Amino acid sequence: MISVDSYRATVSDLLGRSPVTIVPLAGAAGLVLAEDVHAGVSLPPFDNSAMDGYAVRAADVAGAGEVAVTLPVADDIPAGRVDVAPLEPGTAHRIMTGAPLPPGADAVVMVENTDGGTSSVRISAAPAAGTHVRRTGEDVVKGTLALHAGTVLGHSQLGLAAAVGLAELAVYRPLSVLVVSTGTELVEAPNPLRHGQIYESNSVMLAAALRGLGCRVDVVRSVVDDVGEFRGVIEPKLAEVDLLVTSGGVSAGAYEVVKDALTGQGVEFRKVAMQPGGPQGCGRWDGVPVVTLPGNPVSVLVSFEAFLRPALLTAMGHTDVDRRRVRARLTESMSSPTARRQFRRGFYTPTEGEVTGLVGPRGGPGSHLLAAFTQANCLIVLPEEVTEVAEGDEVDVLLL
Ligand code: AMP
Ligand code: MG
């Protein structure tokens, strides 16, 4: 048996690092920036008004208060105006939020402190110089680092890239993954089930989980347990993908189609010291990385968490690839097989004012208990050497 940690490293090594590619901003959400971005313009690019109001010289309205100061309105400056005339002393320009401040003006009086006049304006507040003015480069100075390589591109980062004038970004290319479910018993809805058949669910879960990481995903919903059929359907598709992920057909029984088809072809099948998800395989088929997961749905999800998720995130440039780990006190006793790391589905509740929260199992250890997984928000990790834990014991919890 191989340890969880060493198998995790094997899968990560197999996937390596994805190449850098250029994508439009619209296709970059969730991906990792591969190169530093320097601002091509300052933000704001010019001094502008933070308010709808009147651009003035602060000195001209210094006496405004109970007794208003009246100034002629010499110009009107909506946002987007590019030919703004200087402000002559003793005058005001009506100005809108985001419009360029006229040369000579040093403050903006907000419209609420005026009578809103268009030919002349009564001003009843005396702003200090700089009031309601957004200075050039206050946010970002042209030429400086706006986003550093390694940044995960969320919506705010993409907004900043757009704001400094970029249309595309260099990112680690999202991996393209082919997901294949195997099993003669698998049926796709809305076909009716005959006794002995089940609805296929693994590919739906895997595809969603992989897309959630930013991968491009293709799915073969099910292949029957026949080596010739499996090879014939899947091998021609390998050339188009970076990774093949299969489920089912890798354990110790007969009719283990994935194991039978890929043993001796560059894929190694081994037992990992974990429960669920012990039977695993990985390697290359026709040069393409392959990760073969067991068939039980919970084994699929736990394998995804333990191996695929960190390896794929690392490959696509992420550095923060681990789920947050916290300590929690068990609300129930549990047992775990010897010499295997057990991942139990649990529900974690933080306790106010304390470092450790509370966690209780959701469902038993059975790897077919998919419904219980949907009610879990964490995995409870019981280490290899632990066989029994009691109510009140502290355990490690991975927050999903
Ligand atoms: P296997 O690893 O192929 O022996 O499958 C283990 C268990 O998982 C069996 O009960 C299968 O019927 C079930 N199983 C395998 N693949 C899927 C799938 N794609 N969707 C739902 N259940 C599956
Ligand atoms: Mg099977």
Image (cartoon, rainbow, N blue to C red):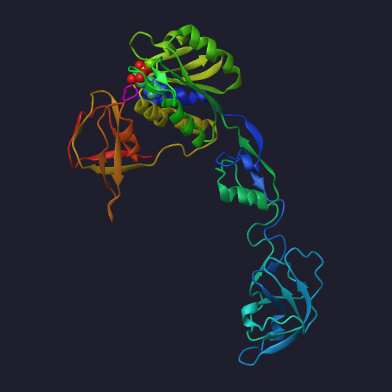
Q: Is residue 97 above or below residue 283?
A: below
Apparent side of residue 270 relative to residue 51 in the rendered image (left or right): left
Q: Is residue 2 at least partly visible in the picture? A: no
Residue 217 location (% of width, % of height): 54, 28
Tally of marks: 0
Residue at 25% from the left image edge and 31% from the top image edge: 364
Q: Is residue 250 above or below residue 374?
A: above
Q: Nearer the viewer, residue 312 or 239?
A: 239
- Magenta stretch, main secondary structure class: loop
Apparent side of residue 302 relative to residue 136 in the rendered image (left or right): left
| Magenta stretch: includes residue 362 | no
Picture quadrant of ligand 2? top left
Name the image quarter holding residue 151: top right
| Magenta stretch: includes residue 273 | yes
Residue at 44% from the left image edge and 26% from the top image edge: 190
Name the image quarter holding residue 387: top left
Residue at 49% from the left image edge and 6% from the top image edge: 228
Q: Which residues are magenta?
A: 272-277
Residue 331 location (% of width, % of height): 21, 42
Residue 234 location (% of width, % of height): 53, 15
Residue 108 location (% of width, % of height): 67, 76
Q: Is residue 345 at least partly visible in the picture? A: yes
Residue at 55% from the left image edge and 13% from the top image edge: 235
Q: Quadrant of the N terminus?
A: top left
Q: Quadrant of the C terminus?
A: top left
Apparent side of residue 125 relative to residue 84 in the rendered image (left or right): left
Q: Is residue 211 above or below residue 116?
A: above
Q: Nearer the viewer, residue 189 or 65?
A: 189
